[in-house]
Image (cartoon, helix red, strand yellow):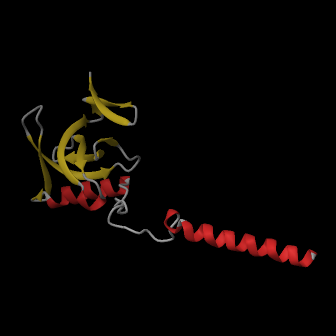
Amino acid sequence: MKKFLISIILTSITLYGCQKTAEHPSEHPEKQEHPSEHPEEKKESKITIEDIAIAAENYVKQNYKDGYFLYKDDSTGKILKLKLDKIHRERLSPIGNNTYFVCADFISEDGTKYDLDFFMKGKSPDSLEVYDMTVHKVNGKPLYVWVKVGDIWKRKYD
Protein backbone atom coordinates (compact mmCIF):
# COMPACT_ATOMS: atom_id res chain seq x y z
CA MET A 1 0.00 0.00 0.00
CA LYS A 2 2.83 2.39 0.90
CA LYS A 3 4.49 1.76 -2.46
CA PHE A 4 1.20 2.35 -4.24
CA LEU A 5 0.66 5.71 -2.50
CA ILE A 6 4.23 6.86 -3.24
CA SER A 7 3.75 5.87 -6.88
CA ILE A 8 0.49 7.84 -7.14
CA ILE A 9 2.05 10.94 -5.49
CA LEU A 10 5.10 10.87 -7.80
CA THR A 11 2.90 10.38 -10.87
CA SER A 12 0.65 13.27 -9.81
CA ILE A 13 3.63 15.57 -9.25
CA THR A 14 5.10 14.66 -12.65
CA LEU A 15 1.79 15.15 -14.48
CA TYR A 16 1.14 18.47 -12.68
CA GLY A 17 4.60 19.75 -13.65
CA CYS A 18 4.13 18.77 -17.31
CA GLN A 19 0.71 20.40 -17.38
CA LYS A 20 2.06 23.68 -15.95
CA THR A 21 4.90 23.76 -18.49
CA ALA A 22 2.50 23.17 -21.39
CA GLU A 23 -0.05 25.61 -20.00
CA HIS A 24 2.16 28.73 -20.44
CA PRO A 25 4.98 27.80 -22.81
CA SER A 26 5.46 31.31 -24.16
CA GLU A 27 5.99 32.96 -20.79
CA HIS A 28 9.63 31.88 -20.73
CA PRO A 29 10.61 31.04 -24.30
CA GLU A 30 14.11 29.86 -25.00
CA LYS A 31 14.17 31.75 -28.31
CA GLN A 32 12.67 35.14 -28.96
CA GLU A 33 9.36 34.67 -30.81
CA HIS A 34 9.37 37.98 -32.69
CA PRO A 35 12.96 39.22 -33.04
CA SER A 36 11.95 42.18 -35.20
CA GLU A 37 9.78 43.53 -32.40
CA HIS A 38 12.76 43.58 -30.03
CA PRO A 39 15.88 44.13 -32.12
CA GLU A 40 19.24 43.94 -30.44
CA GLU A 41 20.82 47.27 -29.72
CA LYS A 42 23.51 48.12 -32.21
CA LYS A 43 26.70 48.24 -30.21
CA GLU A 44 28.88 51.22 -31.08
CA SER A 45 32.61 50.92 -30.75
CA LYS A 46 33.96 52.72 -27.73
CA ILE A 47 36.21 55.63 -28.64
CA THR A 48 39.59 55.66 -26.92
CA ILE A 49 42.22 58.36 -26.62
CA GLU A 50 44.29 56.36 -29.11
CA ASP A 51 41.42 56.56 -31.63
CA ILE A 52 41.26 60.33 -31.16
CA ALA A 53 45.04 60.69 -31.41
CA ILE A 54 45.15 58.65 -34.63
CA ALA A 55 42.29 60.70 -36.12
CA ALA A 56 44.14 63.94 -35.28
CA GLU A 57 47.44 62.63 -36.71
CA ASN A 58 45.70 61.53 -39.89
CA TYR A 59 44.03 64.91 -40.23
CA VAL A 60 47.36 66.71 -39.85
CA LYS A 61 49.11 64.39 -42.34
CA GLN A 62 46.32 64.81 -44.89
CA ASN A 63 46.60 68.58 -44.63
CA TYR A 64 50.37 68.98 -44.93
CA LYS A 65 51.40 71.44 -47.67
CA ASP A 66 55.06 71.74 -48.62
CA GLY A 67 56.08 69.95 -45.42
CA TYR A 68 53.96 72.07 -43.07
CA PHE A 69 50.54 71.94 -41.51
CA LEU A 70 48.95 75.31 -42.28
CA TYR A 71 46.72 76.83 -39.63
CA LYS A 72 45.10 80.24 -39.58
CA ASP A 73 45.40 81.73 -36.09
CA ASP A 74 42.11 83.59 -35.61
CA SER A 75 43.53 85.74 -32.81
CA THR A 76 46.34 87.15 -34.99
CA GLY A 77 45.01 86.48 -38.48
CA LYS A 78 48.37 84.90 -39.41
CA ILE A 79 48.79 81.66 -41.33
CA LEU A 80 51.05 79.47 -39.21
CA LYS A 81 53.37 76.94 -40.82
CA LEU A 82 53.58 74.16 -38.27
CA LYS A 83 55.27 70.80 -37.86
CA LEU A 84 53.64 68.22 -35.61
CA ASP A 85 55.76 67.51 -32.54
CA LYS A 86 53.45 65.38 -30.38
CA ILE A 87 49.84 64.32 -29.87
CA HIS A 88 48.96 64.17 -26.17
CA ARG A 89 47.69 60.72 -25.27
CA GLU A 90 47.23 61.29 -21.53
CA ARG A 91 43.44 61.07 -21.34
CA LEU A 92 40.20 60.71 -23.22
CA SER A 93 38.52 64.10 -23.22
CA PRO A 94 34.79 63.97 -23.96
CA ILE A 95 32.98 67.29 -24.09
CA GLY A 96 29.49 65.87 -24.71
CA ASN A 97 27.29 64.74 -27.61
CA ASN A 98 29.88 62.40 -29.17
CA THR A 99 32.34 65.30 -29.21
CA TYR A 100 35.96 65.04 -28.08
CA PHE A 101 39.15 67.03 -28.01
CA VAL A 102 42.83 66.21 -27.97
CA CYS A 103 45.87 68.49 -27.63
CA ALA A 104 48.73 68.45 -30.08
CA ASP A 105 52.06 70.25 -29.88
CA PHE A 106 53.47 71.94 -32.97
CA ILE A 107 56.57 73.97 -33.73
CA SER A 108 56.34 76.81 -36.23
CA GLU A 109 59.01 77.60 -38.80
CA ASP A 110 60.25 80.43 -36.53
CA GLY A 111 60.52 78.08 -33.50
CA THR A 112 57.39 79.21 -31.67
CA LYS A 113 55.64 76.36 -29.87
CA TYR A 114 51.90 76.03 -30.33
CA ASP A 115 49.50 73.75 -28.52
CA LEU A 116 46.39 73.23 -30.66
CA ASP A 117 43.20 71.63 -29.40
CA PHE A 118 41.48 69.48 -32.01
CA PHE A 119 37.72 69.08 -31.67
CA MET A 120 36.15 65.99 -33.21
CA LYS A 121 32.75 64.43 -33.54
CA GLY A 122 31.87 60.82 -34.10
CA LYS A 123 30.02 57.85 -32.69
CA SER A 124 32.72 55.33 -33.53
CA PRO A 125 36.48 55.41 -34.19
CA ASP A 126 35.89 55.22 -37.95
CA SER A 127 33.50 58.18 -37.95
CA LEU A 128 35.69 60.69 -36.06
CA GLU A 129 36.05 63.96 -37.94
CA VAL A 130 37.87 67.16 -37.00
CA TYR A 131 35.39 70.03 -37.04
CA ASP A 132 37.37 72.74 -35.24
CA MET A 133 40.80 73.62 -33.88
CA THR A 134 41.90 76.34 -31.50
CA VAL A 135 45.25 77.61 -30.28
CA HIS A 136 45.35 76.60 -26.63
CA LYS A 137 48.89 77.72 -25.76
CA VAL A 138 51.67 79.76 -27.31
CA ASN A 139 55.15 78.94 -25.96
CA GLY A 140 53.50 77.27 -22.96
CA LYS A 141 51.27 80.23 -22.05
CA PRO A 142 47.58 79.21 -22.06
CA LEU A 143 45.01 81.35 -23.84
CA TYR A 144 42.29 79.47 -21.92
CA VAL A 145 42.05 76.66 -19.39
CA TRP A 146 39.93 73.54 -19.29
CA VAL A 147 37.56 72.98 -16.38
CA LYS A 148 35.58 69.82 -15.75
CA VAL A 149 31.86 70.35 -15.17
CA GLY A 150 30.44 66.96 -14.21
CA ASP A 151 31.83 64.57 -16.81
CA ILE A 152 32.19 67.30 -19.43
CA TRP A 153 35.24 69.47 -20.13
CA LYS A 154 34.63 73.15 -20.97
CA ARG A 155 36.91 76.03 -21.96
CA LYS A 156 37.30 78.96 -19.59
CA TYR A 157 38.92 82.14 -20.87
CA ASP A 158 40.63 84.47 -18.38
State which quarter of the image contains the C terminus.
top left
Q: Is residue 62 above or below residue 73?
A: below
Instruction: Give the camera-side residue of 109 and 79.
Output: 79
> What residue is drawn where x is 68% and y is 69%?
16
Q: Is residue 84 above or below residue 143?
A: below
Asked if residue 51 lies left or right of residue 60, the reply is right
State which quarter of the image contains the N terminus.
bottom right
Residue 72 position within the rendered picture, expressed as x and y whole percent measured from the top left = 10, 42
> What residue is drawn where x is 55% and y is 67%?
23
Residue 31 position within the rendered picture, expressed as x and y whole percent measured from the top left = 46, 71
Q: Is residue 154 above or below residue 21?
A: above
Asked if residue 21 lies left or right of residue 73, the reply is right
Q: Check the image and name the residue furthest to the top.
A: 158
Q: Check the image and name the residue furthest to the right.
A: 1
Q: Check the image and name the residue furthest to the front.
A: 1
Q: Determine which quarter of the picture holds residue 153.
A: top left
Q: How many marks?
A: 0
> What residue is drawn where x is 61% and y is 66%?
20
Asked if residue 144 lies left or right of residue 38, the reply is left
Q: Determine which quarter of the picture holds residue 35.
A: bottom left
Residue 102 position within the rendered picture, expressed as x and y whole percent measured from the top left = 30, 46
Instruction: Give the camera-side residue of 16 and 41.
Output: 16
Instruction: Give the camera-side residue of 107 and 6.
Output: 6
Asked if residue 119 lies left or right of residue 150, the reply is left
